[in-house]
Image (cartoon, grey):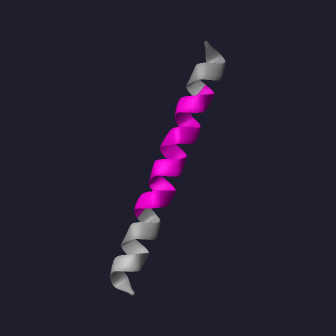
Amino acid sequence: MKEEDENEKEEEEEEEEEEEEEEEEEDK
């Protein structure tokens, strides 16, 4: 269970980073 929770956290963080990158592109 613990490993799965850590994997989910990593996936969520990656998704957030992708969203931030998209926002930066829109600002240009």
The mark tally for this picture is 0
Q: Which residues are magenta?
A: 10-23
Q: Residue 21 in the image: x percent, y percent? A: 53, 31
User: Which corner quadrant holds the N terminus?
Assistant: bottom left
User: Which corner quadrant holds the C terminus?
Assistant: top right
Q: Is 27 placed above or below 14 here?
A: above
Q: Residue at x 53, y 49 (%)?
A: 15
Q: Residue 6 in the image: x percent, y percent? A: 37, 71
Residue lying farthest to the left in this orientation = 3
4 vs 19, left or right, is left
Residue lying farthest to the bottom in this orientation = 1
Task: Tell whether position 13 is magenta.
Answer: yes
Q: Residue at x 59, y 21 (%)?
A: 25
Q: Residue at x 46, y 53 (%)?
A: 13
Q: Is 2 placed above or below 11 here?
A: below
Residue lying farthest to the top in this orientation = 28
14 vs 20, left or right, is left
Task: Tell whether position 25 is magenta.
Answer: no
Question: Magenta residues: mostly which secondary structure?
Answer: helix
Q: Residue 10 in the image: x percent, y percent? A: 41, 60
Q: Residue 22 in the image: x percent, y percent? A: 59, 30
Q: Is 27 placed above or below 15 here?
A: above
Residue lying farthest to the right in this orientation = 26
10 vs 18, left or right, is left
14 vs 27, left or right, is left
Q: Residue at x 52, y 40 (%)?
A: 18
